[in-house]
Image (cartoon, rainbow, N blue to C red):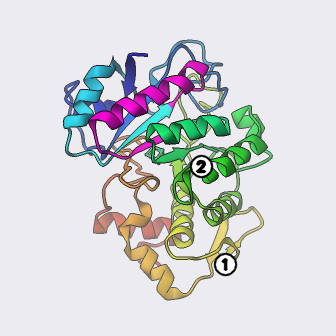
Amino acid sequence: MRRVRLSYGSAVELGLIKGVLRAKPTTAYLFLKDVRCRGRCRFCPQSSDMGDEEERISRVDWPEFALDDVEKGVSSNRKFQRVCIQCSDEHSVKEGVLGLVRELKGGSDLPISVSTSPISLEQMKRIREAGAEILTIPLDCAGEALFPLIKGRSWDDHWRALRDALGVFGTGKVGTHIIVGLGETEKEVVTLIDRLWRMGVVPSLFAFTPIRGTPLEGKPAPALSAYRRIQLARHLIVELGAAAKEFRFDKDGNIAEFCVPAERLDEALKDGATFMTRGCPGCNRPYFNERVSGPIFNYANRPRPEDMARIKGDIFGSAEGH
Ligand code: SF4
């Protein structure tokens, strides 16, 4: 496999294509694909259920380049803080990613994250030995009952993989992605964040983005207010030591109250980082979930004071906050 796909922003930042970026990626995002992903995720344009070959993951185009050009670009780039390799679910990719990690490590000191569907313990060890720092196994769907319908896969198999990954990569070096808005409740997302964080897995939030041609193309993106509440809950749990049981949920499973000390809530709300892209260190994923015109779900850069006023309004129903 001597070719690899790059997110549009990463390709511009590496000088492989010309373009103007509103926000520059701080991670180089690579996508390794051979023929066709075997996955059947109902939200994903890469799914094997899609008719035509697609270049997108979520909203982002992933043009293809010669591997040598990408490696050269990554080794001479001084702006990236990390390389992220997202893997299509194919046997050849599980082998190919080992060589890619080794080659990238040979030319650059940047830490590498690999994101893949569940793989064997042996494969995890080989990816670790090749030089990857973080392994991400995306759960994507937070609802256990919904999971097989959305992902077409086994919930238990993903948890087995997350536990195995912790054994190989260690606490804080295993990640997962959660897509908000697939039909789960806020309570399910928050309970999942709490469970993951306590076991040593770093959860990263995405907003569901309807993509034309996918089975979920008609489903709307989540309400911004719901997404903000979940971002705040994640920050309280992951950064400020809160627990899901400290939040009160209404009968529909929405967060009704953050029952944490006022100082802790103030601290989370004054820190714009709460609403920025969270995940592996140095990952900002500009415009993965949003149009440049907004609404912005994950801020790639720190939100401005006027953004923060709006965010507080989204959470508490008034621009004055709580
Ligand atoms: S959090 Fe960012 S760097 Fe880490 S696996 Fe996900 S997309 Fe890649």
Structural crowding at the residue carrying mark 2, measured as other residues with C-alpha within 10 Å and reported as few (<14), some (14–19) or many (≥20): many
Q: Secondary structure at mark 2?
A: helix
Q: Nearer the viewer, residue 50 or 4?
A: 4
In this rendering, the answer to whether 180 lies above or below 269 is above
Using residue 37 as the reference point, say whether residue 132 is left or right of it. Answer: left
| Residue 155 seen | yes
Q: Which residue is mark 2?
A: 168
Expressed as whole percent of the image width and height from the top left, the position of residue 131 reads 43, 41
Expressed as whole percent of the image width and height from the top left, the position of residue 275 reads 43, 61
In this rendering, the answer to whether 227 lies above or below 244 is above
| Residue 289 seen | no
Residue shown at 51% from the left, 62% from the top = 231
Q: Which residue is mark 1?
A: 246
Which segment is the magenta one? Answer: 87-115
- Magenta includes 90? yes
**Alpha-carbon distance for marks 1 and 2?**
32 Å
